[in-house]
Amino acid sequence: MQVNISWRGIEPSDTMKEVVNKKVSNLERFSKRILNAEVVLAREGARYLSELEVKLGKASPFFAKEQAYDIYQALDSCVAKIKRRIKQYKSKIRQRK
């Protein structure tokens, strides 16, 4: 899976890049069909904004957006939302068969 990270108003550090890659690449446990993921991390005043878009094969992309006072908390919330949506999508596909 290819992970693209964009930063707005934040100086990226190597540890932050590693954490983002690790958390987003863990999504592959839930679906092997993930093609790529795009992460946008931004600072808006005192809050941090995290956006995550994951593309699965032929399915429409999954999108999550979160705000928090901690950048890692915002990222964790986005990843949790995407995990939940992937699980819902997979159960929906299983029910059709």
Image: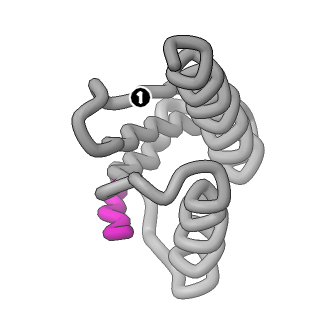
Residue, x 58% and y 29% (percent of image)? 90
**Which residue appears farthest toward the bottom when viewing the image?**
14
In the image, residue 92 lies in the stretch drawn in magenta: no
User: Is residue 77 left or right of 78 when viewed as pictured?
Assistant: right
**Helix, strand, or loop for circle 1?**
strand
Residue, x 37% and y 38% (percent of image)? 53
Depth check: give the residue in front, 46 or 62: 62
- Looking at the image, is 43 positioned above or below residue 90? below
- Looking at the image, is 20 positioned above or below residue 15? above
Magenta-tinted stretch: 1-7
The image quarter containing residue 76 is top right
Depth check: give the residue in front, 60 or 13: 60
Q: Is any part of residue 67 visible from this angle?
A: no
Residue 32 location, x and y as percent?
A: 49, 59
Q: Is any part of residue 35 visible from this angle?
A: yes
Residue 2 location, x and y as percent?
A: 32, 69
Q: Residues within 10 Å of mark 1 (few under 14, many from 20)?
A: some
The image quarter containing residue 91 is top right
The residue at which mark 1 appears reads as 62
Depth check: give the residue in front, 72 or 69: 72
Residue, x 59% and y 24% (percent of image)? 94
Task: Report the predominant secondary structure element of the magenta stretch.
Answer: strand
- Looking at the image, is 31 positioned above or below residue 64? below
Where is the N terminus found, in terms of image quarters?
A: bottom left
User: Is residue 83 left or right of 92 when viewed as pictured?
Assistant: right
Residue 4 location, x and y as percent?
A: 30, 63
Residue, x 66% and y 37% (percent of image)? 83
- Looking at the image, is 88 positioned above or below residue 46? above
**Which residue appears farthest toward the left when viewing the image?**
58
**Which residue appears farthest toward the front when viewing the image?**
97
In the image, residue 6 lies in the stretch drawn in magenta: yes
